[in-house]
Image (cartoon, rainbow, N blue to C red):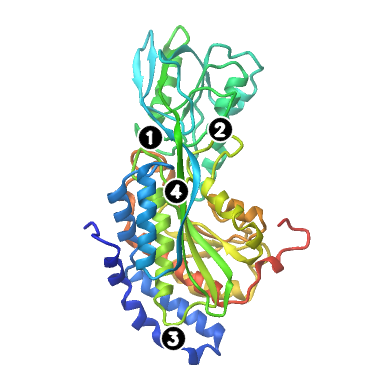
Amino acid sequence: MLLSSSSKLLQLSAGAVSALALLTTPSMVQAQDETAVRTAEQLRDRALEGSIAYDLVSELTTRFGPRLAGSASEQAAAAWGAETFRELGFDAVSVETFPLALWTRGETRVEIVGDFQQPLTAVSLGGSIATPADGIEGEAAIFETYAELLAQPPGSLTGKIAVVLQDTVQAQDGRGYGATSPIRGQGPTEAARRGAVGYVLRSLGTHDHRFAHTGATRVGEGTVPAFAISPPDADQIRRIMRTADAPIRLRLFSTAGFTKDSVSQNVVGEVRGRERPDEVIVIGGHLDSWDLGTGAIDDGAGVAITAAALKLIEDLPVKPRRTIRVVWWGAEEVSQPPPAQGLAGARFYASSRADRAAAHVAVSESDFGARRIYSLGLPAGAAATPFARAAMRVLTPLGVLLDPAPATGGGPDTGPLVALGVPAFRLNQDGTDYFDYHHTADDVLDRIDPEELDQNVAAWAAFLWLLAESDVDFRALRPATGTP
């Protein structure tokens, strides 16, 4: 049932106070380490009984639908987010606004013309420019891999439409998407350098359903109108290639483009630390989404998980030693005209706090769907510490393993802070089927399992309490030869 107001969320977490009070009374703070572990275990178990996370993502996606960066829907969702933070009892709630160029998708059509004439299921890539009013028609220069396109000399694709059919490999940690994302991000520019007049790629998805994935591409001069087609349509082109006696011809049409100046915003709230309030742990997710689905797994789930975890901590009768801050970043998805290319909200947050970066203890983001967390990644040098052993004592019952590889980032929106030297950790989610739905019309609430969502909340709440209560300094643990 849709929540009528954020106040209903409070009812779901009220029981946490009585359940945890005995373990967090001031008289027990002397035994800090063991008390912190026991309180983390209780936070974990309380989350598994049911958190507010599913209700948050349900209200967000039902009330506001898709939340394209800079749109009225994203702005309304941010106002709701700030109201929700206040009703959840968070401190220092604010909405930080920054300028943004609004990109809109408009109308999109891709079709095979001539022999084998038929429409293809396609979307414009985020940030792409429009075609001329009459569209673009040309011979398809088809490449099985992106490397084959890059091997073409300048001028070799003049007047043609470049098509890349490379698949995205399914993987639990999403590395298949990492390997193919340059096909979308840089492909249109590389095709234009070789004379192409348009660009089409197989969607960066790991399914075989007939819907297409959007996603950001490079913005600026020297690019061409760019489109993604569904995986079955890419396979259809392969079959036609084997049958046709002549080159395939395509017609492209799009009205996409940047339409006006707008604003986006970050929503910020925190639970202020009782002893070290100036030492800040930053968590969150991104509030904006693509315009095809309702942004449930990307990233409604992430904003809900992190807020729900912080609410469990806020319910405790004793606040954490360090401050824990949740940020719902705006404008993560859509690229911007040069010189800025993307992550506008994260860049704004980091740049406005550059002089306070040293006070940020750690940063991480939940932005990989809603499946179970299966591993913990810590900053370099932290895996063999007593802190790591305490964390695994609490997280192992959730099925979470310690990743021996150091965490080099905590998610896309953490990048600007990491560049300022802030250590990152990761609570790694099972992303095996994430790219089946990511950036598509099928990114909807129905893809979320409430029990899996609560497992995420349990891991986040327990780990955050341990980190906030500890004296661990991740910066001091870095090897002398390591990078900041």
Mark 3 sits on what residue? 23
Q: Mark 2–mark 3 contact, CB under 8 Å? A: no
The alpha-carbon separation of the residues under discs 4 and 1 comes to: 14 Å
Viewer-closest of 78 and 261: 261
The quadrant the C terminus occupies is bottom right
The three-letter code of the residue at mark 2 reads: Arg
- Measured from the top left, where is residue 244 in percent x and y? 43, 10
Q: Are marks 2 and 4 in contact (CB under 8 Å)?
A: no
Compared with 269, 31 (above or below) is below
Which callout, 3 or 4, points to the residue nearer the camera? 3
Judge whether residue 371 can be spotted in this image: no
What residue is rendered at 33% in x and 65% in y?
Answer: 52
How far is mark 3 from mark 4, CA to CA? 38 Å
Residue 460 makes an appearance in the image: yes
Image position, residue 66 (x, y; %): 35, 43
Give the labeled residue for mark 2.
218
Crowdedness near tag 2: few (<14), some (14–19) or many (≥20) residues, C-alpha within 10 Å? many
Q: Residues within 10 Å of mark 4 (few under 14, many from 20)?
A: some
Amino acid of disc 4? Thr
Q: Secondary structure at mark 3?
A: helix
Q: Give the class, few, some or many, for how many residues have Cα within 10 Å of label 3's Cα (few <14, many ≥20).
A: many
Q: SS for tag 4?
A: loop
Instruction: Name the residue carrying label 4.
Output: 432
The residue shown at (43%, 56%) is 302
Residue bearing mark 1: 208
Amino acid type indicated by mark 1: Asp
- Choose mark 3 or mark 1, whichever is in front: 3
Q: Secondary structure at mark 2?
A: loop
